[in-house]
C-alpha cells in the first residue's frame, strides 16, 4: 500500500540497523523527568539513552530528584543537592528541584526554574567534553539549561519538542498572563533559531515549524513508539486476579489530568451502568485523580476500579487484562497534532483502541486498522463503540493483531533510537 511505502521512507530513511556506528558520540541528555518516575517522557528518555549506549555512545543524563507527579521528594533525596547513579550504562546525575504537592502557577514556575538552574550547575560539574547537548521539552525552561551548557561545553545544541509550548498551556487555560505569554514566545523563537537541530515527535509539529521558516535540514521527525519486548500480550491472568473474568473490561492507563477530560470519562462510566457486564479499569495518577475518586464515591460507580500507577514493567499486564483501550483527549484544535504515546503501547499489547483524538493520531489508528475513532468528549459515540466491540470479539482480535504488526513494522523504540543516532551523527 502507498501509505506503508511513504511511512517506511519517513521513519527508516538511510537506516541500516545491522551496521554499528563507527564514531562514539558524547551526549549530555537533559530531561527533567526520568525513571523511577513513570510517564511517556520518562520512558522515551531512558529508552533513547539506553539504545544510544547500546550503539556504543557515551550518555550522561541530567535530571531531577524523582517527585513527579506527587510533588513529594522521597526521604533519601531530602537535604541533598546532587547524586550520581548508573542505570544500564547511562550516567545519571540527579539534582535538587523545588517540589510541592500544591500545584499553582507560582509553584509550577518555581519547580521549573529550580531545575533549570540546578541542571546548569550539575552540568558544569560534569567533567569532560561533549559533542551534543540534547534537551527534551516540555518543561520548556530546560531549553535554557541546554543552550547555556552547549555554549559552555562547546557542543551542539539539539532541542526536542514533544509539545508546542506555550501554545498548549494557553489552549488548556494554564497560562493566561499576556506579558508572560509574549516573553515565553520570544524564548521559544530563541530556541528555534539557536538549535543545531530540532527534533519533533509529530508531523503536525514538523509542518508548523516549516511554516515558521525553519528549514527542513534542521528538522528531524522522530515519533514516539514503544518497547515491543516489554509491551506485548501477557494474557488475561491479571483479569482473573482482579475478579473481572466475567466482565467486558474497558481500560485506561496514564495521567489522570486536565487534557484527558476525566470528568467526561466519569460521565461515560455512569451512563454505562445500564450494562452491568461492562467494567472500567483506570490505572494511573495525576492532578485529576481526586476528582475521579470524588465522583466515584458520590455517584457510587461500582463499575469503575481505580488503581494507582504501577511500575512500567507491569503496565502490559494491566493492558492485557482489559478487552478494549480508551485513549481520550479533550476537544481542542491543538490536539490534532498530538499523538498520545499510549496508542503504541496498547497496539503492542494487541488491544483494540477507542480513540477520541482527531488529526494525526486518528490517521495512525486508521492506517493501522487497530480501533475506532470517536469525537472527543462525545460520550454517546464512545458508548456505541464500546458496545460495538463487545458484540464482536473476532473484530477485537483482528484489530489487536493489526496494531501489533503496525508497531513492529514502524514504531519500535530500537528503530527510532537508531534514527536519532544517525541524526546526531550528522552534526558531529
Image (cartoon, grey):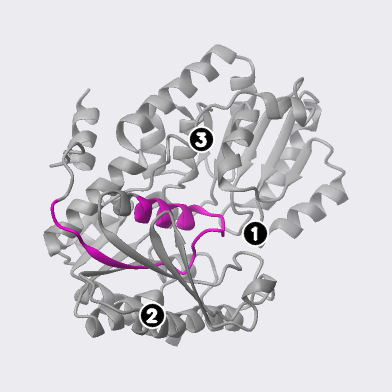
Query: How busy is the neighbourhood of tag 1: few (under 14 within 10 Å), some, or many (20 plus)?
Result: some
> Residue 140 at what x, y percent from top left?
41, 73
Residue 70: percent from the left, percent from the top? 66, 66
Please tell me whether mark 3 sits on a helix, a strand or a loop: helix
Of tags 3 and 2, which is closer to the observer? Answer: 3
Residue 134 visible? yes
Tell me, yes or no, if residue 138 can be seen here. Answer: no
Q: Position of residue 37 (x, y in %)?
A: 56, 59
Which residue is identified by label 2? 184
Locate residue 151: give its quadrant.
bottom left
Q: Is residue 390 above or below residue 265?
A: above
Report which residue position mark 3 lands on: 346
Asked which secondary structure carries label 2, the reply is helix
What residue is at 66 percent from the left and 77 percent from the top? 100
Q: CA distance from mark 3 to mark 1?
A: 20 Å
**Count of numbered badges drawn on the protein:** 3
Q: Which residues are magenta?
A: 22-50
- Badge nearest the viewer, 1 or 2: 1
Distance (Cα) linking label 3 and label 2: 35 Å
Q: Out of 113 and 229, give the one closest to the viewer.
A: 229
**Between marks 1 and 2, how big is the CA–CA gap?**
25 Å
Neighbor class of circle 2 (other Cα within 10 Å; few <14, some 14-19, many 20+) is some
Q: Which numbered disc, 3 or 2, marks the residue that appears first in the sequence? A: 2
What residue is disc 1 on? 286
The first of marks 1 and 2 along the sequence is: 2
Query: For the point 77% across and 25% down, which residue is it?
Result: 275
Q: Is residue 216 magenta?
A: no
Does 34 lie within the magenta span?
yes
Identify the disc placed on residue 406: none
Amino acid at each position: 500500500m502507498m501509505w506503508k511505502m511513504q511511512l517506511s521512507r519517513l521513519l527508516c530513511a538511510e537506516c541500516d540497523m545491522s551496521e554499528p556506528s563507527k564514531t562514539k558520540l558524547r551526549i549530555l541528555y537533559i530531561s527533567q523527568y526520568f525513571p523511577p518516575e513513570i510517564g511517556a517522557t520518562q520512558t522515551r528518555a531512558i529508552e533513547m539513552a539506553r539504545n544510544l549506549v547500546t550503539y556504543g555512545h557515551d550518555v550522561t543524563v541530567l535530571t531531577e530528584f524523582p517527585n513527579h507527579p506527587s510533588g513529594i521528594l522521597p526521604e533519601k533525596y531530602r537535604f541533598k543537592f546532587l547524586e550520581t547513579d548508573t542505570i544500564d550504562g547511562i550516567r545519571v546525575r540527579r539534582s535538587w528541584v523545588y517540589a510541592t504537592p500544591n500545584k499553582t502557577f507560582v509553584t509550577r514556575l518555581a519547580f521549573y526554574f529550580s531545575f533549570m538552574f540546578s541542571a546548569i550547575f550539575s552540568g558544569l560539574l560534569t567533567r569532560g567534553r561533549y559533542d551534543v547537548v540534547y534537551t527534551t521539552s516540555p518543561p520548556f525552561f530546560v531549553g535554557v539549561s541546554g543552550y547555556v551548557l552547549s555554549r559552555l561545553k562547546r557542543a551542539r545544541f539539539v532541542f526536542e519538542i514533544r509539545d508546542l509550548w506555550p501554545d498548549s498551556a494557553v489552549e488548556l487555560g494554564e497560562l493566561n498572563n499576556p506579558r508572560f505569554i509574549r516573553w515565553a514566545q520570544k524564548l521559544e523563537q530563541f530556541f528555534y533559531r539557536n538549535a543545531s537541530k530540532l527534533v519533533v515527535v509529530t508531523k503536525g509539529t514538523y509542518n508548523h515549524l516549516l511554516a515558521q521558516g525553519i528549514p527542513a535540514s534542521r528538522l528531524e521527525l522522530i515519533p514516539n513508539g514503544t518497547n515491543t519486548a516489554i509491551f506485548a500480550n501477557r494474557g488475561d491472568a491479571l483479569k482473573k486476579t482482579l475478579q473481572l473474568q466475567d466482565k467486558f473490561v474497558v481500560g485506561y492507563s496514564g495521567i489522570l489530568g486536565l487534557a484527558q477530560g476525566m470528568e467526561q470519562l466519569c460521565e461515560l462510566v455512569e451512563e454505562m451502568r445500564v450494562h452491568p457486564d461492562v467494567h472500567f479499569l483506570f490505572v494511573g495518577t495525576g492532578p485529576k485523580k481526586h476528582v475521579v475518586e470524588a465522583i466515584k464515591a458520590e455517584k457510587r460507580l461500582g463499575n469503575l476500579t481505580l488503581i494507582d500507577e504501577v511500575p512500567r514493567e507491569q503496565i502490559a499486564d494491566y493492558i492485557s487484562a482489559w478487552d478494549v483501550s480508551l485513549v481520550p483527549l479533550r476537544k481542542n484544535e491543538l490536539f490534532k497534532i498530538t499523538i498520545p504515546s499510549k496508542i503504541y503501547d496498547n497496539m503492542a499489547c494487541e488491544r483494540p483502541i477507542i480513540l477520541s483524538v482527531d488529526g494525526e493520531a486518528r490517521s495512525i489508528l486508521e492506517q493501522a486498522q487497530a480501533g475506532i475513532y470517536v469525537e472527543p468528549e462525545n460520550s454517546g459515540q464512545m458508548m456505541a463503540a464500546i458496545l460495538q466491540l463487545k458484540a464482536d470479539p473476532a473484530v477485537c482480535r483482528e484489530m489487536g493483531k493489526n496494531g501489533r504488526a503496525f508497531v513492529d513494522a514502524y514504531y519500535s523504540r530500537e528503530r527510532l533510537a537508531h534514527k536519532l543516532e544517525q541524526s546526531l551523527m550528522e552534526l558531529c
